[in-house]
Every structure is written in C-alpha cells, then in structure tokens.
Image: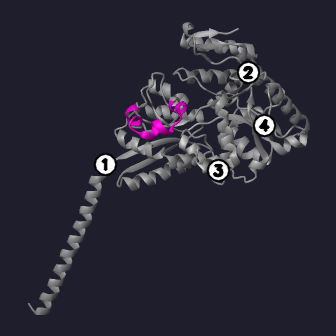
Amino acid sequence: MGKKTKAVLAVGSILATGSLLANFIVLSANATTMKRSPFAGKTITIAYQQFGGGHQTQIWLSSVRSQFQKIYPSSKIVLEPINASENEYYTKLDLMNQSAKTAPDIMVEDTFLVNSDASAGYLMPMNKFVNSWPAWKKDFYPAMQKAAESTNGTVYGVPFNTDTRGLWYDKPLFKKVGLPVPWQPHSWANVLQAARTIKAKAPGVTPLWFYSGKPMGEASTMQGFEMLLYGTHNTLFDSKTKRWVVSSPGFLNSLNFVKTIFTQNLAEPLQNALTPESSTIATQQLMPKQKVGILLDGVWEYSNWLPTGPAPWPQWNSVYGVAKMPNQNGGGFTSMSGGWTLSISSKTKNAQMAWDFIKLACNKSNMLHIDLMDANVTPRKDVAAMPAYKSAGHGILSRFASFNAFTHFRPAFAQYPSISNDIQNAMENVMTGSVSPAQAMQQYAQQVTNYVGRAHVTSVK
C-alpha cells in the first residue's frame, strides 16, 4: 500500500470519526433537550367552537401552541375545532367527552355548562393548580373566579373572557328618523317606541334584531329572554328558597314583549330569526349595510368588523353606538354576563401538560391578545388596566365593562341547560303564534316541575 493511499485512508478515517463525533454531539444535545422537557413525546388535544367566518380562538390557541412548543421541545399540541353552532357545539363536545378515546385534554367550556359537565364527570377539579398560581389570587376578578366554580367551590376552569350585553343602535339612522343621538332608553316602552319609529320611517330596515327561539340556543335565552326578565322584579331562581321560579309577572311580561315585537313586525323576519345563522346575518351581512336599527347583543360583536374579523368594516364606530338595556318600567338598567373557560378533561392522561398550556394561554400578554381580538370583557384586573385595553374599540370595551355595575349571572346549577332549552321553546311558541304567552308560561312551568320536582319550584304573584 503506497503512502498516497495510506494518506487518503487516514483522512477518510479522520472525517468518518469527525462525522460520528458530530452525530454523537447532536444526539447528545437532543437527548439532553428531551430530558429537560417534561412533556417531550407527549400530546394533548384542545377542542373549541369554530363557526361562521370568525377564527379568533384558533388564532389565539395557535399562537400559544407555538410559544408552548418553544418552551417544551418535542411536545405536541393538536387543535380540534368543532365547526358547529352554539347548541351543536355543546352536543358534539358532550359526545366527545363520553369516551376516553375521543375526549379532548382541554376544552373551551361555556361557564353555564360548568356545573352540568362537572356533575356528568367530564371535568377535572383544578383547585390544586390554580391555588399554586399567584396570578389566580392576585389578578383575576373574584366574580370571574366564581363563574368557573361549582356550587361547592370546586374550580373547573380558567376564564379567558367574560361579557356584558346592551343595545347597539345605528346613529345616522336614528338622526334620519328623528330619534335622539346619543340614545338612552329608560324603559321597555322607550325601546318599542324607537322600533316603531324606525319601522314607520325607514322601510327595509329591521327595527329591532332580537334573538329568540331554539336555533339560536343559549343566545336566545341570555341575549334575549334574560335581558328582559332580569329587568323586571323577578328572576329564574329564588336564591332564598333555593327554588326555580316557574311562574311570575316578569316571566309573563317578557314573553309578552317577545309576542309584541314579532307580531307587530318590529323584529327580524321569522326566517332570519329561526336559524342558527341569525347573528351572522345581522352582524356580518346587514349591519355593515345599515339595515339594522337596534341589536340587543353583546360586547363581542364589534370583533366582526375589525381587520382580523370575518366582516372588516372600518366605519363601524361612526355608525353604531351602544346604550344600556333599561329595566321594564325604568328605575335602572340591566345586563347579563357569562363567558368561556379553558377546562381540563377528567379523562386526560397529561393533566400537568394541560395545566401548563392553560396557564400560558391565560397569562397577561396572551389574555390581552384574545380579549382585544375577540372584543371580550377581560377577567383579569391587570389586563383591564393596560392602555391598549382601555383604548380598544374606540372605548367600546370600557363602555361595556361599565355594565358590570348592574349585570347578572345565570343560575349556576346542573339543571340550567335543560331549563334554558325550555325557555327557548316558550319563546319560539310565542313568536310563531302557536300559543299565547300565558299558555307558554304554563307549559314551561309543567316541564320544569317534571324534572326538578315540585319541591324545587315556586310561583310568584
């Protein structure tokens, strides 16, 4: 063997050795990273609602996923959007939760379902997690913490938004038909008078868009019926006697309001009301064309018109103003609040990983991200104090946040979802004219009594 051949072999040997050494270093580094990352090789899934053109929740969760995977290399986050209307989302999520094979590790949970889903065994108690998280005690509003609790104080989620509701109104239209701007009604009669004026003087415009009936699900109950009922002297649940109020003057008056606006053509046509797309039709199609005079709805609706929303509309703030919803006969105002949480499945095998993701998603900067993008009233005090939040939506967020002074929350009991469905039935029967308001209330009383028991209901005269 010649010197040249030996030299080539020597060089080849050195290169091979160097290559092996380099590979060893890379593998060692990867092994160290894997060892340092407690969630390496682990996967969690996150289920959330996606409906219509809005993708704000997905954008937010995708951003948090990227952050999480940088902190914990080799971990995997799978987003599972459920393309469904609100009621269908609840149903599909319920079906997923019935099996460990299909249950997500994390789910976006409506606060009104926390008690029923916890009772069904779908949710993991999270007290041990939140109690060791300083931000929970220091930065979250106490009322928002309560929204994620069961009646015995068990925490089942971290809220990432809350909301209030009021009356959106078209300022140029109001001026055109001779109604005052700014507008602030002080009774239901004032609201009806404005709707009748719009009907008489602005043909082709829906005077008052009001969610009612089964297709719009909980939106009908909360944005519609309860925004009326809680402006009377009555409620759905008597906290003193611990009984459901199945018959009351306020309940009947609320159904009479529904009858009035639909039979007098002051509300949207039935084909637009009795569809799960009712909100999309109003906010994404007709309001940008100034074809809706008044909309009874929540703070989040202007997110439709932001550059990141499904129906960008730069002029929205110069067109629509916001008024407080008045009590029936004056003497104050009313609103309803709810919101969504990130909750952990009781069937998860990676609870710590799920919790670390939630903690990251709900930190100060990520909470600001979703609450600005989705036009939410924030559950965090430190976020509410940020200049970016205070100025959001030309001050609309702060305006709706002020409604917290007179807002109400839905009864946090496992029976509530069923009772909400009965309310939607009563509304739909009245709006379609199949029964009178008195008959609808009687049917509602019987339905609720049948499944909660006579000992758990009461009537108010």
Between 88 and 307, the one nearer to me in the picture: 307
Judging from the image, what secondary structure is the residue with disc 1 in? loop
Residue labelled with disc 4: 294
Between discs 3 and 1, the one toward the N terminus:
1
Q: Nearer the viewer, mark 3 or mark 1?
A: 1
3D distance between C-alphas at marks 1 and 4: 53 Å
Residue labelled with disc 1: 38
Judging from the image, what secondary structure is the residue with disc 2 in? helix
Range of residues picked out in magenta: 127-145
Judging from the image, what secondary structure is the residue with disc 4 in? strand
| Image quarter of the N terminus | bottom left
Position of residue 230 relative to residue 286, above or below, is above
Q: Can you give x and y, in whole percent of width and height, for residue 327 in the image?
A: 74, 24
Question: At x 61% / y 23%, what residue is drawn?
Answer: 420
Pointers 1 and 4 in contact (CB under 8 A)? no
Between 351 and 131, the one nearer to me in the picture: 131
Q: Which amino acid does label 1 sit on?
A: Pro
Q: How crowded is mark 3: few (under 14 residues within 10 Å), some or many (20 or more)?
A: some
